[in-house]
Amino acid sequence: MGPTLVLINPWIHDFAAYDLWAKPLGLLTLAAALRRSGYRIHLIDCLDVHHPSLLEGEGPLAVRRRLYGTGKYPRLEIPKPACLNFATRPYSRYGISPAAFQADLAAVPEPGAILVTSLMTYWYPGVQAAIAAARAVHPEAPVILGGIYARLCRRHAAATSGADHVVYEDDPQALIALLTCLGLPPPPAAGRKQPLHPYPAFDLLHGLDYICLLASRGCPYRCRYCAGPFLNPHTARREAQDVVDEIRYWRHEMGVADMAFYDDALLAGPGDSIRGLLEGIAREAPDVRFHTPNALHVREISRGTALLMRQAGFRTIRLGLESADFSDRRMDEKVRQGEFERAVENLLHAGFQGTEIGAYLLAGLPGQSAEAVHAALSLVEKAGVMPFISEYSPIPHTALWEAARAASAYDLAGEPLFHNNTLLPCWGAHERARLPELRGKLRTIRESVRDRSAHPPHAVTAEADFRPG
């Protein structure tokens, strides 16, 4: 076998964090690729809710799971970064304890290199803390930083993270080339052991409540607030049978019943490919529950697609509505007048309950009013499904970035902590003051949807009452 590499998913430092089918899929995919190349892999996931230290030191409440495997992370309040001292909410470190992290590091003798991933730009303090702790245990090992923060905030990551190298490509071969330059080449192919499976290395985690999947990469839409076109400029789909085979593997070999699609545009693409995927799932993996936390494009949800989704076992549906102002689609063009209502009608006809269907609404966009969010909530209320307010985070390399900088009172370019959506950084004080009112309306709508779902006026039709298996 080749050199030993330590792969780290760092802590989250933030005002809030929740495990909503959140796994480091990119890091686990990289781990699988490096393992196939012959490297020894040791994974440390600071957000692993099944880490042995949590069971030993904090009791079962630390890993209690909610519906479909979601739940809270262990949390410890920590001092805020100085530039966020004005915020009234507590600031916390989410994940395992530093002592448990250091013990995991110390269990790996002389790793060849330490690879750290990153996600949200404003979570970089957790990245810095993980790199500093890794250096304290293994000062001779080079530290390589990658991930979304590293790609979106290159200069900041290179200057402040503490890593020896920052990689900006989403390409395992480029990383292997860097490792080779550092004197850590993979072993010759003849000496490699065959991997257990060709899928992301979820087996390196201590427990599995759910699996994350990708059936496609990229998105054909170019929403101005989204970094997808920068991070994944090209679209590509896996063969439907390849995805079905992976689902069957996790269900039958690993016993996992809940799976979340991470696709940016799961239903977009040729209709026959989507139909083939859904029919294959229903036929070959009928006892799996599927979830769509990244949202589905409402335009793609025809009556036939909705029926196939129900038959295939989809249970948590999230729709990307974002706004109800269809006369001004400068932010995106993915929803036209009437398409949201039609998609909801098709899903309800297929047998989904209102509580199983959610609509994401953006708040805090540059130039957006609180009244616009109020109108979007009213549209979702009329449709009879669950609203979810997503506070806007300004992201470098998006089409909206310069407008966000102009609208914000914070130094967005110089300090990624000001990207934090909790701050509503592109809204003024008047609009921010309306947020409690909007959240109150959101709660009222949700309670009404739950009540109607618990006491439906009539049973669904036999045609719509699909059940997996």
Image: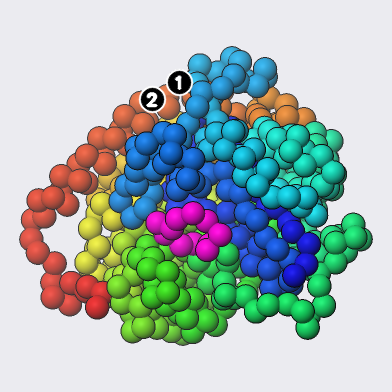
Relative depth, front residue between 289 and 232: 289
Is residue 312 shown above or below 363? below
Residue 83 position within the rendered picture, expressed as x and y whole percent measured from the top left: 67, 19
Q: Quadrant of residue 237?
A: bottom right
Q: Which residue is mark 2?
A: 436
Asked if residue 386 can be seen in this view, the reply is: yes
Which residue type does callout 2 highlight? Pro
Q: How is the image coloured?
A: rainbow
Q: Residue at x 61, y 49 (%)?
A: 44
x, y percentage for residue 168?
79, 54
User: Which amino acid is tagged 1?
Assistant: Ala
Q: Are marks 2 and 1 in contact (CB under 8 Å)?
A: yes
Residue occupying image coordinates x 49% and y 84%: 241
Tag shown at residue 411? none
Residue sitting at x 34%, y 43%: 64
SS class of the residue under badge 2? Answer: helix
User: The magenta stretch spans which residues?
Assistant: 202-212
Q: Is residue 204 magenta?
A: yes
The answer to whether residue 419 is above or below residue 397 is above
Q: Is residue 232 left or right of residue 317?
A: right
Quarter of the image with the N terminus is bottom right
Q: CA distance from mark 2 to mark 1?
A: 7 Å
Residue 405 makes an appearance in the image: no
Residue 235: percent from left, percent from top: 64, 70
* Residue 299 lies in the magenta stretch: no
- Name the residue carrying label 1: 433
Q: Position of residue 36 (x, y in %)?
A: 69, 73
For the residue carrying disc 2, how many other residues have a C-alpha within 10 Å: few (<14), some (14-19), or many (20+)? few
